[in-house]
Image: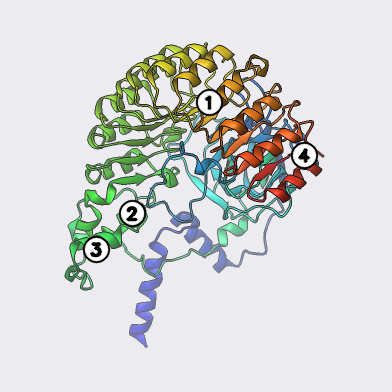
Amino acid sequence: MFPMLTLLSMFYYICLRRRSRSGTRSEALGSRRAVELGQRSALPVTVEVEQYGKEVLDFSSHYGSENSMSYTMWNLAGVPNVYPSSGDFTQTAVFRTYGKWWEQCISSATPFRRTPPNFHSLDYLELAFEEPVYPTAVEVLETYHPGAIVKILACSLNPFSQNPPADVRWEVLWAGKPNKALTPQARQFSPSIRQISFATNLLRLEVNSSLLEYYTELDAVILRGVRERPILALYKIPVIDINDLSDSEEEISDAGGLCCRSGGENRHNLGNGYFDRLPYELIQLIVSHLPVPDLCRLAQSCKLFHKHCCDPLQYIQLSLQPYWARLTDASLSHLQSRCTLLQRLNMSWTGNRGAVTAAGFCSFMKACGVSLVCLELSCCHFLTEACLEVIAQTCPCLQELNLASCDRLQPQAFNHIAKLANLRRLVLYRTKVEQSAILSILTFCPELRHLNLGSCVMIEDYDVVASMLSARCRSLRSLDLWRCRNLSERGLAELVSGCRLLEELDLGWCSTLQSSSGCFQHLARSLPRLRKLFLTANRTVCDSDVEELAANCSALEHLDILGTRMVSTASLRKLLQSCPLLKLLDVSFCSQIDSRFVQELCGLFPNVSIKKSFTQ
């Protein structure tokens, strides 16, 4: 009996020494004492605080422009503008994409291997509130096509504080899978959230709109919480992992297992369960299915797995985006020795608020960038001109570069991209790239196949850019000029005459183009390979333009003519009959196309998703 009691006492002692997942060790011991003293009955009454968002601090994309409030993420701050009404309203926050359409385009990036199956996020926004509270509820007012939210997180940083903490923590309040509501009507989304150990006034919503039939629209976010930490949280008994009872103070880094030690051989067990009898290649295949944190943890189990998990062949592709909240300079430093053969790297969303520094990133690139062909860096606000200079110097083979929404990069930084002569795909959506830099890039990067200049408001004359594209980039396959305000009919004519291999062209909200000049008919005759064409919100698109598309662009798959007043039912019917590959047709706010006719067309052409948004 005595040995059994001794064993149980030792087990209990070890459990108390382990770091609790619900709080610090001192909190765990305090919880124990509180339970022992029977203080549960003395719970103070706390007043719940309700507050709307004060300021949108960051986001990955939005439908609106940088110089307007219509359909922008900034609409999410403050009290509701639309709710409880349903429909398509300009006063709401709308992300740039929805559905599977964008994933099917030739301009989309190839997915990365080893992406965790529970990572669903495609877009995000960060919203600050006035007062830090311990959250009791989060309510999101969704006014159109709800269901996109897949994760809600809280941050320990007070964005309005003059003394930010050295360690910024993000905790998941709620997470789910992508879905779509049964109806596009408005709803108040208020999932059950978990308690956290710190007060917060900074929330992050992550969304995945891939299952939605149309753009999701968000109106406001409500944060409910209490000013004092709930006493019940102090009684939460620590959750102990039976497989993680080491008494050592040296633990795996909080960075999700990404800080992997290369040394420490004394921690490796000698037994490996007969794995050493398997062929090297077979073990490599087995471990290749592990997410990066699991790969790093497995490396610490025995010498055999350490050898396999540190093999550079396991790191040909590396996606760190799912671990954006935990990635640090130390993580990159520990990964350097393993990434000597790295070819594709995704660091999108990572490193913000000081977690990754420009120096740490540059050090990693100098060590691992020589074989890199694809680099995804969207929304990486730690990037500086020095970072782009290092990329240009150390990545001679780079073919794909994504800097979408890196809106804090200074204009002169983009000049270094011109040194990447092998570029095939370049995404500069929502950046401060200027005309001189983009002309230099087009001059020295003639092999460009895919170029995204959507919402680049610093470019003064898109006609000059179109002329350079026509002269230097004749192999261009896709071009995104979403919301470019100064492209004229002359520039468009020059573009389509020189870039005849174009398959995707986004001219959404390019209001300076006038159909009466014949520019859209010339476009249709010049681009027989065209598969995607967005003429969103161009009021002048007319029947002759649609009929010319029907006659010359039989490969057309996606067409957006939202907002035109001059397209009739007859030309639409002709288009659908002439384009058998058509999958998406947006005729929202087309005054001559009513809902009854859309329903008729949906019955006649069931393979085409015809969009007709509404306002209630």
Q: Which mark is residue 614?
A: 4
- The first of marks 1 and 4 along the sequence is 1
Residue that label 3 marks: 283
Image marks 1 and 2: residues in contact by CB distance under 8 Å? no
Residue 426, given in percent of the width and then of the height, sits at 41, 29
Q: Which of marks 3 and 4 is in front?
A: 4
> Is 53 drawn above or below residue 1 in the view shown?
above
Q: Which mark is residue 454?
A: 1
Residue 185, given in percent of the width and then of the height, sits at 76, 47
Crowding at dot 1, Cα within 10 Å, few <14 / some 14-19 / many 20+, comes out as many
Residue 11, given in percent of the width and then of the height, sits at 37, 72
Protein image colouring: rainbow
- The first of marks 3 and 4 along the sequence is 3
- The first of marks 1 and 2 along the sequence is 2
**Distance of label 2 from label 4 (alpha carbons):** 52 Å
**Distance of label 1 from label 2 (alpha carbons):** 42 Å
